Amino acid sequence: MKAAIWGLGGLGLGVGLMYWSDPRSGRWRRSHLQGRAVHAAHEAGSAVDVVRRDLAQRSRGLFFESVSRFRSEPVDDVTLTERVRAALGRVCSHPGSVKVSARDGIVTLEGSILLEELKHAVPYLGRVRGVRGMDNRLLPFAQSGRQSELQGGIARRRPFGSKHWSPSSRFFGALGGLSLASWALQQRGVLGSLLGLGGAVLGIRALSNMELRRLTGIGVGPRAITLHKDITVNAPVEEVFAFWDAMQNFPRFMTHVDEVRVDERGRSYWKVRGPAGLHFEWEAVVTRRVPNQLLAWKSVKGTSVENSGVIHFEPTAKGGTRVDIRLSYNPPAGAIGHAFARLLGVDPKRQMDDDLLRFKSLLERGKATGHETVTRESLAPNQSGRPSLMH
């Protein structure tokens, strides 16, 4: 077993040395790594200052909160009502649908609430300072359904199930993860492996400040990673929309896209080059198409890289077009896989920026360079049979 571990370690070291000392791209990779190291040092200094201030403020707040609990100060009904209403907004997605009133320390709750939120909202509100009792008259609903007061809103999570951790929580989480991982290295057997894995997961969760589902890509569909970009092109909106409507032209200017085929049903088949020379393939369908306004798509179920996106087209006052692009995707291993790809020099955000610059050049100047130099005249017609770029 030990020989196998040493063998894998030697193999990894050899691959790393080949990657960083490559005579063709190694110099750029080393320079890029050095630049990122300097940037990381500056970011670390800024993070230390943020954690210091957050710890100071939270410690001060905890101190005054603790002191106030030992004081038997009378709380008038108006103040208590406002305290409960403020706390309600932290655990309820539709606080406006709940009527709060108080009398002699007894808080009455009336209105509509989602059943899932009711389970932890009432106990949480009962712990608000000054509350002596709760009179729960809320009407719970399993789903918003036809209840207009429960439509929309922002989903709330339990206080200890927050999507984003505070700087202090991240600091202690990273410290705890590092301690667990260090202690696990001294252990043997299943216990040591589990502790090491737990420490690594806790450390990554704290450093990235991302949910475990997004980190691993499990159970989040195509929304593990989201990219947003907008660009203005000096071309009519009809021409710009026709360009994006012809997906088979994308490999001509997108350097990481090897092939896109579109069948008669409008379903597209993609072949994309990923990190370390790996290739990924998937199928996608157009979910919504509004000529000259909107184009949306998503991958079909079971694909290796789940993804979805929407593009909005908006004409400008000077005759150009503003293109707003939102792209979500779930790479293998989720955000961890995304971070590994960036470590290998494959940055999807930078690729997207470069592709959009080539797209802008193609429409404004008539040519751009991807796998090859491409011009307007060489592009294929779109799905409707019209030329993808109008003249």
Image: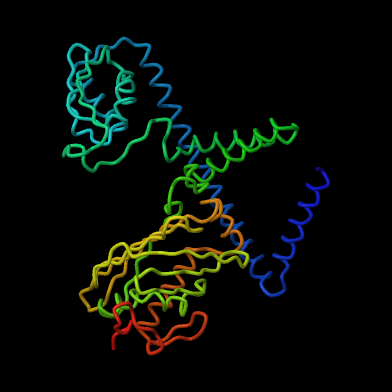
Residue drawn 21% across the image and 41% down it: 151
Q: Quadrant of the N terminus?
A: top right
Here the colouring is rainbow
Depicted 209 relative to depicted 119: above or below: below
Q: Position of residue 342 (x, y in %)?
A: 56, 60
Depicted 205 relative to depicted 390: above or below: above
Residue drawn 45% across the image and 86% down it: 374
Query: Relative to 356, is 41 on the left or the right?
Result: right
Between 84 and 278, the one nearer to me in the picture:
278
Farthest residue to the top: give it. 72
Depicted 385 relative to depicted 266: above or below: below
Q: Quadrant of the C terminus?
A: bottom left
Farthest residue to the right: give it. 3
Q: Position of residue 270 (x, y in %)?
A: 47, 69
Between 158 and 39, the one nearer to me in the picture:
158
Q: Position of residue 200 (x, y in %)?
A: 61, 40
Residue drawn 56% across the image and 57% down it: 39
Between 214 and 169, the one nearer to me in the picture:
214
Query: Relative to 373, is 308 on the left or the right?
Result: left
What is the quadrant of residue 82 in the picture?
Answer: top left
* Number of numbered callouts drawn: 0
What is the quadrant of residue 14 in the picture?
Answer: bottom right
Between 271 and 134, the one nearer to me in the picture:
271
Farthest residue to the front: give it. 264
Depicted 32 relative to depicted 41: above or below: below
What is the quadrant of residue 177 in the picture?
Answer: top right
